[in-house]
Amino acid sequence: MAGDVECDNPNMLASARSPYLRMHACDPVRWVTWEWVEERLGSIGKPLFVSIGYSSCHWCHVMQRESFRNPVVAEWLNRVFVPVKVDREERPDVDEYYMAYCQAVRGACGWPLNVLADEHGRPFAAFTYLPPGELVRVAMAVEDAWRRGEPQRVAEYAGKVLGEALTRAPHTGPPVDDLFDSLLDWARKAYDAEYGGFGAAPKFPMAPLLEALLAVHYRRGLREPLSMVLETLHWMASGGIHDWVGGGFHRYSVDRYWRLPHFEKMLYDQACIARVLGAALRIARDPVLLRAAQGIVRFLEREMLGEAGFYSALDAESGGVEGLYYTWTVEELRDALGGLYPLAEKLFNVEPQGNYLDEATRERTGRNLLYVGEPLPRAAERLGLSLDELLSLIDEVSERLLEARKAKPRPAADYKVLASWNGLALWGLASLAAAGVDGALDLAVEAARRLEAKLLDGCEPRRAYARGEAYGEPLLPDYTHLALGMLGLHSVTGRDRFLELAHCLARGALRFQASDGSLRLKPGGIVERSEGAYPTGYSMGVEAMARLGRLLDDNSLLEAARRAAGPLAGLAAEAPAGMPYALVALDLLEGPSFDVVLAEGEGWMRALEGLAAEPRHYVTLAVNREDGYLWRTAGYARSMPALAGRATIYVCEEGVCSLPTHSVEKALAYVRRRGARRGAL
């Protein structure tokens, strides 16, 4: 299993499947896996040095080069601790536990996350990046303190408090309209009216928040939350966070202006931004946002699709240099662009000395990062071009630079395929397919085929796939993210298999429900309490159970969703902007919500496309055919035939269905009218 690990004395990580763990296999630190430690907790006799990261994390690479490959540092870590390496993507349960501790004692935290814990795994100190000298001083101090029993006393108290906090579900929260009010108040204060997004620097896409603002817009008809979403998407699409050449988006922007990114490209960002772009394009066919959406599809297909589904990420570095793949010297741009260079120079703010500054030193690197720095309609006006002319120019520039980029060292891919993140990808691509984005549907269907073949046993997922095999005990998001991804695919294809998979995956999530109603990350484990880049398995679990419980007349799912909703509302009430997608799920459950059932008949695919173009989150769309999955599973569906042999639409609300119609427009008008709440559309 060591395979491509080449060194004389590899540590235990040489047999790992995770690319992140394997890259540490030749460190002089004698790393062990969390699974090895987990079996021995309480009997190790030494403190643990738990180092958590992921393969595309830039500062994880820096700390490895500076500290974990340093023989002096390694000697001290090996002497004082049992050093444990954890891939946060493989073990989000471990990451969530130690991240909660770090945030409690230090405030802001990130990766690499390094935690000192006692032999039971209870933390007593935490930090992120540390240079070699400081790391040695920490080891020396712990060695001395351990003999006196000081860390053990701190760890015992911290473990008790942390365990109680993370396993306790909050009390039932307020109605969703109150949560909407709180979220909107927060958004108004945090929104950057000049550059879009929320807060100052750094700026993250925060797709779950954008989804929640769209939910407020749909229910209340307010223009303000919709404007926040559309303006943020335009600013993101204009900045360096957007890969103009290869498509897709980097993880976040270091600055307020969306210009300087951290260059790693995560699957979950592509998935969740795609989801929001799909909704935006169904509201308004915006050519700028359409180009960004098409770029995500091309990027996923060209660079992320493997034998079992989509890879997890691309590194920020290539050739040992952060951003090398994405930045350009003036000479490289001139050679690649020829006569297009003068206009591209003005459009993308190219400077002879380079516009890309090193993040740590703030010095010029001689390289240029492509960014426009203003919404494209405004840039077109500045350059004396129409928007169509500007987009054509960008396409031609991108095509030439994509060819030139082939000569550069490519960032390493984290080839690990995660069930949960692939569920998000199907969910996002289904949104783009509903908006008519070219290639999104075919790509999603192919990815789903590979996932089912490699990661699913019937409808039981494994956590991950790498190096030719599926592995890992599944967690809550592996079921719930995949369930909604498969349901999304059913809504744009009408295929029964996707609906069947969605249903059995949602039912598989029932075993994660605790006696207090909350959904746990693993049975008997902790409750997920924050969502920034993507929704929690908890929020999407409530949504999946509510949608499929109603649609398929499955009362056990619907009752589980209702029991889980109270604690979820309590979590959202603590910080609505910290659990924004919870509001989308809770609003769907509180209603009014609609199951739109399309009976298969002549013209059904055209009708399905028209119905799928409705972006409102409170609509669940399904195709009913004689002896199909919906027909066999939900008793009411057998009384919904295609009339006169033509595609026929039934709109159902809380088990009561409207008169059938052949008109997509009439069905959607009914949904919008009935879905209005507190001044909504």
Image (cartoon, rainbow, N blue to C red):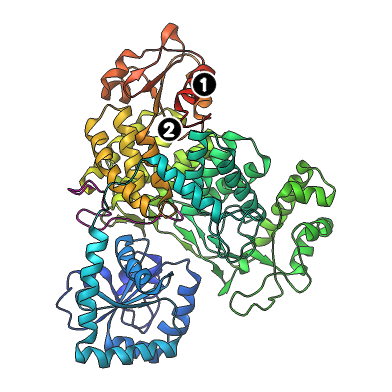
Going by the image, does 214 lie left or right of 377?
left
In the foreground, 218 or 594? 218
Query: Is residue 523 a member of the stretch shown in magenta?
Result: yes
Going by the image, does 72 lie left or right of 405?
left
Q: Which residue is drawn at 58% across and 78% down?
A: 360
Query: Residue 277 lies in what quarter of the image?
Result: top right
Amino acid at dot 1: Ala
Q: Percent from the top left, x then y, of residue 401?
A: 70, 58
Q: Where does label 1 land, which residue?
A: 669
Q: What element carries label 2?
A: loop
Q: In this view, does 44 lie above or below 608?
A: below
Amino acid at dot 2: Tyr
Is residue 641 visible to us here? Answer: yes
Residue 618's disc is 2
Q: Residue at x 47, y 28 (%)?
A: 676
**Marked residue nearer the N-terminal end (1 or 2):** 2
Query: Magenta span covers which residues?
Result: 513-534
Q: Residue at x 75, y 45 (%)?
A: 392
Q: Percent from the top left, x then y, of residue 91?
A: 32, 62
Q: Percent from the top left, x then y, of residue 180?
A: 44, 43
* Picture quarter with the N terminus: bottom left
Query: Is residue 279 a member of the stretch shown in magenta?
Result: no
Q: In this view, does 659 lie above or below 143?
A: above
Q: How far apart are marks 1 and 2 (CA)?
A: 14 Å
Task: Please tell me whether the stretch drawn in magenta is mainly helix, strand or loop.
Answer: loop
Q: What element carries label 1?
A: helix
Q: In this view, does 563 lie above or below 338?
A: above
Q: Are marks 1 and 2 in contact (CB under 8 Å)?
A: no
Query: Residue 312 lies in what quarter of the image?
Result: bottom left
